[in-house]
Amino acid sequence: MSNSEDIISYLLFFTGLLMTLLIPLPIKDEYRLFIISAVIFGFLVTILSRYTTKLEKQNRELEDLDKRFKTIEDLNDRY
């Protein structure tokens, strides 16, 4: 299930992209292409940083579970 932040960021991205593509701005095509690629790049950086944060959180949880499991094994071996 998506977070509300994810949904908002997707909506902002697509709104910005559509505005950039559809609004007839009096700029050259090269600059328009640069703006579109900057919007896409910013979106990708945001999404990848969120996934990195989620992966780090999962790694910490796995390390905690591994420590607990080793403790339980040690206790079982003693008795």
Image (spheres, rainbow, N blue to C red):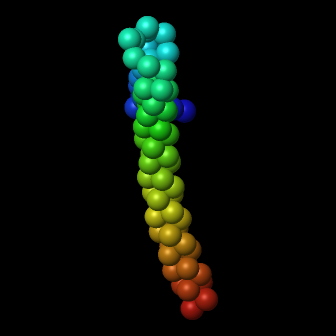
- Residue nearest the viewer, comparing 11 with 54: 11
8 versus 24 height, above or below: below
Instruction: Compare residues 53 and 63 and report the one nearer the observer.
Output: 53
Q: Which residue shows up at 44% across the image and 19% down it?
A: 28
Foreground pick, 23 / 64: 23
Q: Residue at x 44, y 52 (%)?
A: 53
Whether 9 is drawn above or below 66: the answer is: above
Q: Is residue 70 above or below residue 19?
A: below
Residue at x 48% of width, y 53% of height: 52
Q: Residue at x 44, y 48 (%)?
A: 49
Q: Is residue 1 left or right of residue 42?
A: right
Rendered-image quadrant of the N terminus:
top right
How far across and how far down the image is residue 76, in percent? 59, 83
- Asked where in the image residue 69 lies, by quadrant, the reply is bottom right
Pick the front one: 56 or 60: 56
Q: Position of residue 22 (x, y in %)?
A: 48, 10
